[in-house]
Amino acid sequence: MSLMWDCCCYSKLQCVMCYLEGHSPDCCPWLYTKCRFPHCDGNRKLMISYTTKNYNIKHLKCQHSKCTEFQWLFDTNV
């Protein structure tokens, strides 16, 4: 487990933001993360898809207006 979770790590707790276990919502590692695209200084935001095909599926999307970085949350590694 990451050291950044030490302050708020609860083994049985499920985060209400990402629905993963082991941390509280106030220190969810997926709320805002650095964009993975080269030369982009944007941050990725945790979002929820509401399309018919992917309804209620969480994903990370860069907030920079010119960046197209996107990643499904279930494809990420902690």
Image (cartoon, rainbow, N blue to C red):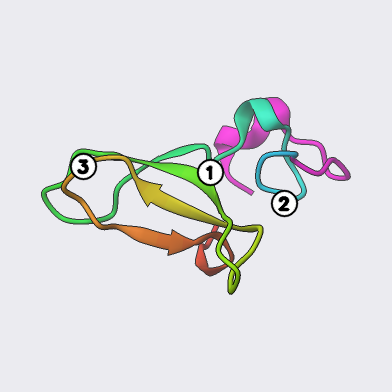
Q: Secondary structure at mark 1?
A: loop
Q: For the residue carrying disc 1, how many other residues have a C-alpha within 10 Å: few (<14), some (14-19), or many (20+)? A: some
Dots 2 and 1: beta carbons under 8 Å? yes
Dots 1 and 3: beta carbons under 8 Å? no
Q: Which residue does the numbered mark 1 point to in the structure image?
A: 30
- The Cα atoms of the two marked residues, 3 and 2, are separated by 28 Å
- The Cα atoms of the two marked residues, 1 and 3, are separated by 20 Å
Percent of width and height locating residue 73: 55, 59
Q: Secondary structure at mark 2?
A: loop
Q: For the residue carrying disc 3, how many other residues have a C-alpha within 10 Å: few (<14), some (14-19), or many (20+)? A: few
Magenta part mainly helix, strand or loop? loop
Q: Residue at x 61, y 36 (%)?
A: 28
The amino acid marked with disc number 2 is Leu
Q: Residue at x 20, y 51 (%)?
A: 67
Q: Which residue does the numbered mark 2 point to in the structure image?
A: 20
- The Cα atoms of the two marked residues, 2 and 1, are separated by 10 Å
The amino acid marked with disc number 3 is Ser
Label 1 or label 3, whichever comes before in sequence order:
1
Q: Which residue does the numbered mark 3 point to in the structure image?
A: 65
Q: Residue at x 15, y 55 (%)?
A: 38
